Image (tube, grey):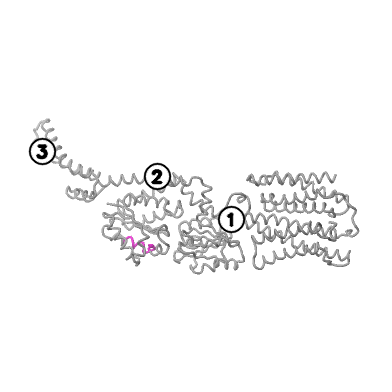
Amino acid sequence: MGTILFELALTAYFAATILCIIEMFRGGKGPSRLVLAITGAGFFIHTLNIVYRYATAGHLPITSMHEASSFFAWCIVLIFFFLEYRYKIGIMSSFILPIVFVLMLSSSMLPREIHPLSPVLQSYWLGIHTSIAFLGNAAFAVAFGIGLMYLVQEHHLKTKRFGGLFQRLPSLQVLDEINYRLITIGFPLLTFAIITGALWAQSTWGSYWRWDPKEVWSLITWFIYALVLHIRMTVGWRGKRAAILSIIGFVLVLFTFFGVNIFLKSLHSFS
Amino acid sequence: MNILVVGLSHKTASVEIRERLAFNGQKLEDGVIGLKGVPDVKEVALLSTCNRVEIYSAVHNVSSTAEKIKDFLAEFHQVSRSDFENSLYVHSEVDAIRHVFRVSSSLDSMVVGEPQILGQLKDAFDFALTKKTTGVLLNKLLKKAISTAKRVRTETRIAENAVSISFAAVELAKKIFTELSGKSFMLLGAGDMAELAARHLVNYGVTDVKVANRTYERGCDLAKQFNGKAIAFDTFLKELVFTDIIICSTGSPTYVLLKEQMQKVMKERRQRPVFIIDISVPRNIDPEINKLDNVYLYDIDDLQEIVDTNILGRKQEAEKAERVIEEEVKTFLQWMSSLDSVPTIVALREKAEEIKREEFQKFKDKFPDMDEAKLKAAEYLASAIINKLIHPPTVALRTDSEDKDELIAMIKKLYGINGYEQ
């Protein structure tokens, strides 16, 4: 049952991604309602899948890489719909949905079985710490997509070539504003995730901070986004530089999420 | 009589020369009246805008009068002739007519198709009318110039060009700022096209308008139009810190804004984006500025290119406009030549016919018993005599010659024909 729901959601995201990429290159007025409808359907099924796994496992399904990737993707779609509702930037789907699809695809390739929860994770912190962390990461993921959009539009305006996506991309100001807002949402969430993580670590491992690779890389990511916000407020780094920093930031997020688990030995290897 | 145009424009003269030779305010009246006093200038009208100064006149001797007009300009503006002589153009006859029509139709404008020049020409014409400095020839020429411009506007899409350029500027601004309302705006320098683009931006809700012009009074006039405020030209750099959109058209031969200066400005405004449109030819803003982050600099060619990709066949429209102008030049030339000879020929013939009628009447009164056949013979004789008499002057009038004006004047004098009506 869970598998079918997951496959259905994956298929829907795949179809929506292919569709919006085709639309992007065909120069349609995009995003067709079709893309939004398919994504919406996928999101609904995806939600059911998560609820189903929650019910089966009895805790937030976020304890394996498969579940974590899936939940990460789910958070991104959630933010995507919120932005689409608020700003109505059709072309945004072409930049965000591929990220969702890639996360879902990697999730689909990882073992799906539900393991009994290890005693370390049996805590009310699990739901709080992880959902906050992933919402923050999702905000950074969308900021990455928006940053890319900014760079493309900036390139159009600087080189004075007005083919391609120029007409369909929104103004630089709007992109910069969204980028900024996402980071101002993501940053406190990340901060909160680190704090709750520390508290949780204290209660289970007996110390707040153990220089675990996950912790270190999270901290590095935190510094990057702190830098983005700080420089913006002091010197006024915005626009292109902010967009580039938010792209770098997301690369760090991805490394913290996947890279640490693959390349480094971490206490967080369960997720 | 001949039509003579002496003038300079953005194509031939730098802004310094244009500003020094401009006829602003009281100078316009003094200039027109002064020019009317130049020997051999029978009719005159004076057009003075940001981008051009032109003197339209009706004269007998083209080359010598052109020299006198140049002398007048030097004396009137207290400028030595050598300073501006190379910037002047002199047109006469067909070239002069064509030039006036091309100017009025905005084919000679910095931005082809901008509509303001026609209004300015109308104003110049009205002013000359109130000062009574024009006559039959220039009145006809300027009226024709206005109607030609209207024809060009309705029959071609040339006017869309300038509007499109302003529109392109607005579209670009919207891709940078989303909305123009609440954005601050500065007009740097003044020019016909800059004014048009500025008006467009103001219509789209740009607020906080500042005008910096070398001539402060002119800046004030413009600022009033846009509900803005005039600032001294040398303070514009400080104001840039608070300006989001700039239209520049100072016409200076060198850059008025350098990269280093803009870099400082950007630092002070904490990198908030700036959109700069440089309409000037040659450019007034260092193109390197476009390389700075958050600065978007567009010159007139960039905007024209955007418009060109939108409107296909702009060249065809220009060619169409040129054809319209050639047609109008032709009809005007026909009118001019008819003005010279035909009315005089007609008047001459009428004069002769009148003499014949009067004398024949006297003859009939003297010989009331004369029979019909003899009367007819006498009338035939009278007709033959007047025809023979007016034949040589008529032929002379019909043939083109250098001294036709003098010939007409002489014949009128000899035969006692007054004025030259149409």
Judge whether B22 appears above or below A74 on screen.
below
- Mark 1 element type: helix
- Mark 3 element type: helix
The stretch in magenta equals B21-33
Q: Which residue was labeled with disc 1? A: A157
The subunit letter for the residue under badge 1 reads A
Q: Are marks 3 and 2 on the same chain?
A: yes
Front residue of this view, candidates B151 and A67:
A67
Say left or right for A24 vs B245: right
Q: Which residue was labeled with disc 3? A: B363
| Viewer-side label of 3, 2 | 2
- Can you name the residue that lies furthest to the front here? A263
Q: Which residue was labeled with disc 2? A: B324
Judge whether A95 appears above or below B289 on screen.
above
Q: Are marks 1 and 3 on the same chain?
A: no
The subunit letter for the residue under badge 3 reads B
Viewer can see residue B128 = no
Q: Position of residue A147 (x, y in %)?
A: 67, 57
